[in-house]
Image: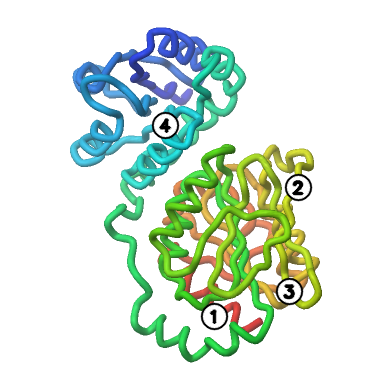
Amino acid sequence: MSTPPIRVLIVDDSALVREILTTLLRTDPEIEVVGTASDPYAARTRIKELNPDVLTLDVEMPRMDGLTFLRNLMRLRPMPVVMISSLTEKGAEVALTALEIGAFDFVAKPKLDVAHALVHFRDEIIGKVKAAQAAREAVVRRVPATALPSAAPDRQAMAREMGRHFRTTDRLIAIGASTGGTEAIRHVLGLLPADSPGTVIVQHIPETFSASFAKRLDRECAVSVCEAQDGMQILPGHAFVAPGNRHLSIGRDGARFVCRISDGPPVNHHRPSVDVLFDSVADHAGHNAVGALLTGMGDDGAQGLLRMRRAGAATIAQDEATSVVWGMPGVAVRIGAAERVMPLKDVADALLAGAVRA
């Protein structure tokens, strides 16, 4: 018996964008566009009438903005939502807020030549709609935006006890993620104490969004977070996010680890690539590192995590139950790259313990 197609409702105030998205999604036989809506009020009616599996939702619309509608939707009828966001700093902030509220993922569109850009991102849009349908149950498993905890007392005590260890040795934490990763990383970093080992992060995210992501993390976390720049020293209490559309790796400058930024070709269809980061950590940090591969589509980072493990690093994969998409960590588990597999809530403590073991 064949699987029924994924029923998609497109919500966008632009008739042109609605037409383009409809045309693009209909090129895939596994997707059925069951309807469109020009604003959230019309969308509310169409959802009741059509019972779609997945929603694509424009961030900026008249009468009711996309975020307000998304909050109401996640409260009253949780379902997978792929946000369509402009490729601007404001668009990045809104998209990140949407992910906190519960959106599955987003597709970034430039403000100019939207029609051409959306055609260019056809595979991305179709891939994210399919992944959203596959992860329907994960929509309600998101860590709520209000639930980001501070470092618990026992974790703070652990940090005080290990503080000298972190400050006087070269320990390193490396984290990679994709779909669902912005919230997973936010959760993990929010649990790390202020004197944690230096941390490097690759999250698959568009150019211009990475700086906003880093600023948001910096506001909410005890560690200092910034977008990585070439040559920055990786110091305790600091975390570095790979810039969008550029690779982040680590190198050595004397006794210190430093960030290296490059414009090499995409690896595993991604730039930044988790494998690029993890390979460099295996080469330069070895047993002094601990790595975690979190939720995400595809397999980027799995081979790099295996290289880290073979180099003596402690390695962690997020488990299937708490992943939005168990692609990258799932592959890591299958190939033996993950020394430990655990729910998201346990990853921060495991990173600290792994850094001490190193």
Q: Say left or right for 110 vs 38.
A: right
Checking the image for residue 256, the label placed there is 3
Task: Report how far apart the C-alphas of labels 2 and 4 lie in the structure.
Answer: 30 Å
- Residue 257, given in percent of the width and then of the height, sits at 72, 70
Residue drawn 44% across the image and 29% down it: 85
Residue drawn 45% across the image and 75% down it: 193
Checking the image for residue 49, the label placed there is none
Closer to the chain start, of discs 3 and 2, is 3
Task: Report how far apart the C-alphas of labels 1 and 2 lie in the structure.
Answer: 31 Å
Closer to the chain start, of discs 1 and 2, is 2
Nearest the viewer among 289 and 23 is 289
Checking the image for residue 82, the label placed there is 4
- Residue 316, given in percent of the width and then of the height, sits at 58, 66
Q: Amino acid at mark 2?
A: Ser
Nearest the viewer among 206 and 103 is 206
Closer to the chain start, of discs 2 and 4, is 4
Give SS at disc 1.
helix
Closer to the chain start, of discs 4 and 3, is 4
Give the class, few, some or many, for how many residues have Cα within 10 Å of label 2's Cα (few <14, many ≥20).
some
In this rendering, is residue 355 above or below 332? below
Cβ atoms at labels 1 and 3 below 8 Å apart: no
Task: Report how far apart the C-alphas of labels 4 and 1 lie in the structure.
Answer: 36 Å
Checking the image for residue 262, the label placed there is 2
Checking the image for residue 353, the label placed there is 1
Mark 2 or 4, closer to the camera = 2
Q: Say left or right for 250 vs 200.
A: right
Q: Amino acid at mark 3?
A: Arg
Residue drawn 48% across the image and 68% down it: 223
